[in-house]
Image: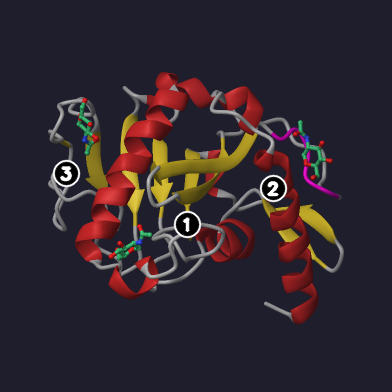
């Protein structure tokens, strides 16, 4: 990406954060009808923080765009940019396959956006990546795959509480090669295709995990 585009991405992200700092836990509060200088769009977009550890004040940031056409019939795709340590919002959503691409100071429609086919959930993980954070900074020295997996599972469970309509959707996740932690008990590195999985609490056992190659 060019430096000017990065400036746009930063502006957009600041706007997303601004919009959700005042938000409560209802998805309506996370809804943002329009990003600065975006072209007209006919799908819903949401952004917000989901706390994964109240005591340590650790919170993960997400950007969610519903499918352009008939979102109710489309699957849910959880996207991790991986790295580890790479922002899913800065790279995946606004540099690769999100609905908009920055061009100078404006946003253009991305004709190859994945939300033409799916409801796309971009997650910044673990805390410390992108806009996800831990108030206890020593977390950044201790974080490992297991903690990340646990946080991601917690995020997902709470996200589904916000968006219950998505609980029974076909669910795919995509991670970059080096990015394995999703949820330690719900899903291991090698998710069998279309296998029903069970979490610690049975609370997301109806999810179907499928890897996208
Ligand atoms: C969306 O974000 C923009 C930029 O921060 C803000 O002006 C607008 O009020 C937000 N809209 C909603 C519905 O939150
Ligand atoms: C901050 O996190 C570290 C590592 O996880 C932990 O040992 C420490 O007790 C935490 N500090 C506070 C004030 O909770
Ligand atoms: C499982 O459920 C218990 C109580 O309902 C809750 O305290 C715990 O955080 C849950 N575990 C996960 C991983 O969500």
Q: Does ligand 1 reach within 8 Å of label 1's beta carbon?
A: no
Q: Which residue is tagged 3?
A: 193
**Residue 35 forms part of the magenta stretch:** yes
What's the mark number on residue 124? 1
Mark 2 Cα-neighbour bin, 10 Å: few <14, some 14–19, many ≥20: many
Vertical relation: 1 (above or below) 52: below
Q: Does ligand 1 reach within 8 Å of label 2's beta carbon?
A: yes
Query: Colour mode?
Result: secondary structure
Displayed-image quarter of ligand 3: top left
Residue 157 image point, x, y percent: 32, 33
Disc on the earlier residue, 2 or 3? 2
Residue 98 image point, x, y percent: 60, 52
Q: Is residue 42 left or right of residue 205?
A: right
Give the quarter of the figure containing the N terminus. bottom right
Q: Distance between the residues labelled 3 and 1?
A: 24 Å
Q: Distance between the residues labelled 1 and 2?
A: 13 Å
Nearest the camera: 76 or 213? 76
Give the quarter of the figure containing the C terminus. bottom left
Disc on the earlier residue, 1 or 2? 2
Q: Quadrant of residue 64?
A: top right
Q: In which quarter of the image is residue 171?
A: top left
Magenta-tinted stretch: 32-36
Mark 3 Cα-neighbour bin, 10 Å: few <14, some 14–19, many ≥20: few
Q: Name which residue lies at 80% across and 75% down.
A: 4
Q: Which residue is tagged 2?
A: 16
Q: In which quarter of the image is residue 101?
A: bottom right
Asked whether the residues under the numbered discs 1 and 2 touch, taking CB atoms below 8 Å apart as contact, a structural biologist would say no
Q: Name which residue lies at 80% across and 66% down.
A: 103
Q: What element carries label 3?
A: loop
Vertical relation: 67 (above or below) 104: above
């Amino acid at each position: 990406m060019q430096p000017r585009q990065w400036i746009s991405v930063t502006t957009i992200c600041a706007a997303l954060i601004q919009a959700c700092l005042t938000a409560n836990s209802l998805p309506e509060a996370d809804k943002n009808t329009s990003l600065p200088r975006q072209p007209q769009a006919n799908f819903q977009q949401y952004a917000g923080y989901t706390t994964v550890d109240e005591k340590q004040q650790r919170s993960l940031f997400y950007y969610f765009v519903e499918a352009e056409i008939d979102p109710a019939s489309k699957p849910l795709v959880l996207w991790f940019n991986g790295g580890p340590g790479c922002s899913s919002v800065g790279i995946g959503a606004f540099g690769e396959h999100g609905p908009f691409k920055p061009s100078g100071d404006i946003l253009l429609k991305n004709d190859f956006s994945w939300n033409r086919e799916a409801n796309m959930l971009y997650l910044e993980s673990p805390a410390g990546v992108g806009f996800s954070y831990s108030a206890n900074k020593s977390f950044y020295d201790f974080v490992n795959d297991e903690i990340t997996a646990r946080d991601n599972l917690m995020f997902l469970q709470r996200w589904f509480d916000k968006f219950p309509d998505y609980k029974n959707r076909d669910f795919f996740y995509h991670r970059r090669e080096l990015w394995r932690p999703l949820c330690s008990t719900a899903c291991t590195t090698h998710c069998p295709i279309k296998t029903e999985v069970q979490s610690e609490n049975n609370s997301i056992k109806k999810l179907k995990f499928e890897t996208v190659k």
